[in-house]
Image: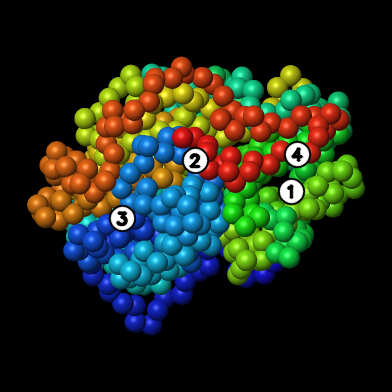
Amino acid sequence: MPASHLYYYRHRAPLPQPPTITADVCIYGGTSLGVIAAVELKSLGYRVVVVEFGRHLGGLSSGGLGATDIGNKQAIGGRSRQFYRDLGEYYGRPESWVFEPHVAEALFNRYMAEADVPTYFEEALASVTKEGNRITQIVMENGTIFRAKYFVDATYEGDLMARAGVSFHVGRESNEVYKETYNGVHFGHPNHNFNCHVDPYKMEGVPASGLLHGLSGEDPGRQGEGDHRVQAYNFRVCLTDQDENRLLFPCPEHYDPERYTLLARYLKKGYWDALNLTIRMPNGKTDTNNYGGFSSDHIGGNYQWPDGDYLTREAIFQDHVSYNLGMYYFLANDPSVPRSIRDEVNCWGLPKDEFVETQGWSHQLYIREGRRMLSDYVMTEHNVVGREYVSDSIGLAAYGMDSHSCQRVVLGGRAYNEGNVEIHGFRPYPIAYRSICPREHECANLLVPWCLSSSHIAFGSIRMEPVGMVLGQSAAQATALALKEACPVQKISVPTLQKNLRHAGQILDPVQVALPKMQVIETDSIRSYNKRPSLKSRGARPVLSLSQAEKLET
């Protein structure tokens, strides 16, 4: 795998004569929601430009997350729903919620080309210039200047928001902050944990020998306490078992088999579930995600990412590549892995026709959570469960409260993953316009549709790609109103915004989604039937079929 192509950041030297680009709206972030926001604004007659840190459009939706986390399809409207219908047209069905990465990227590229939206790639934000509480321009590392009347931060990290001096939070709040139940440190949830006692020490049974790689010796905190920790990142890996399109798993740079000693011990105990969340995509491919006690989530490896500088993030990115790809190489080749598992893993490989420039491995790290804005209204668990209802709805969220593990610790002499939360069974609920608006005194011409004002546990429900695209379109409509009225984004007419959103096909009221109220349940997710039995008793590994995946979360 050419390391020169697989990277997050490369320094951009200053241009001899950097250009100045002017537009009505500048969108920083070519993610799925950034694309949707740009196309919507252009359709309304405004000059818009997209500035993207990386080299591709679509973010996670084109970066390997092909098995869409939905919650309830009927809660998704507007351009977001049209995206899945356009994918369906490509595959010859009414709509498709599972899809190949390159097909999604081609669709985002088509949207931008048809709308004739200028896009600038590999542009790293260096500084933000403000006059009072308004951004006047943003300057890139290479010196390029983008000036606009309004700005949208469509990044997964909230980089423009932070550089603009907007308040934000990183990590988990304590339950006390917003009187929640599932925020902060969370012990006791059985899913995505070790199903047996696995010794955490380098020399089994000898604490003085030190901890195995990936285990933390820090105080893990107490139930419900807040901390700085961020839920784990990984890559959503696209695999194939089609021999004519399959590349063997390469040995990554800086490969260290000792990183997987804990996994080897877990396998030796008879548990083999690391690849259990493998969902079929079209044309013999998969979206493979984290599952079980030890899988692709690099627990504890990302704490410095949200507020880190670009060099820090590049080091974290490369560490995740080595960790994730190394796990596949380990499972396919290491003699400590049972032969039956090695044979099974070697039936899979990276697809030759996906992520071609990096030989089948995604360029997009799964940034599950970055900064979260602090504004006049914070979305919390109370919104998710229906205890609190907002009248300034700009779209619906419909997924359960979902957090991946935040730390791997030692409890009672055994390895334990802390922080996994999966609370499902709620009706769709509205997202407040106020939650994507900074406080007016901090910034009056910026909207933040992804890193919105939300608690950690509520963000775990909102942070799904279809909802991101909904919020991207809503942010575009709100920006258009602010342009028309020449006012701060905080001062637009929300009823007018809602009228325009409904006209654009957005779904704002849960009443529009006719479903019986369900009992709140704690569950591994609706994919829980895909659990793997122990190695000693299991048959063939279950892989969720394409038809099953299409029917999920309806």
| Mark sitting earlier along the chain (2/4) | 2
Q: Is residue 353 above or below residue 270?
A: below
Residue 71 visible at all? yes
Crowd class of label 2 (few under 14; some 14 to 19; many from 20; radius 10 Å): some
Mark 2 against mark 3, which lies toward the viewer?
Answer: 2
Describe the element under mark 2 as helix, strand or loop. Answer: loop
Image position, residue 349 (x, y; %): 73, 57
Describe the element under mark 3 as helix, strand or loop. Answer: helix
Q: As shown in the figure, which amino acid type bears the numbered disc 1?
A: Met
Cα separation, mark 4 vs mark 1, equals 18 Å
Q: Which residue is mark 2?
A: 69
* Most foreground residue, 70 or 209: 70
Residue 368 visible at all? no
Mark 4 against mark 1, which lies toward the viewer?
Answer: 4
Mark 3 against mark 1, which lies toward the viewer?
Answer: 3
Q: Is residue 131 above or below residue 180?
A: below
Q: Is residue 512 above or below residue 336?
A: above
Cα separation, mark 2 vs mark 4, equals 22 Å
> Which residue is at 28% across, 74% downward?
20
Cα separation, mark 1 vs mark 2, equals 24 Å
Question: In which quadrant will I find the N terminus?
Answer: bottom right
| Mark sitting earlier along the chain (4/3) | 3
Q: Which residue is mark 1?
A: 327
Cα separation, mark 4 vs mark 3, equals 41 Å
Crowd class of label 1 (few under 14; some 14 to 19; many from 20; radius 10 Å): many
> Which residue is at 27% across, 72% downward?
21
Q: Which residue is mark 3?
A: 37
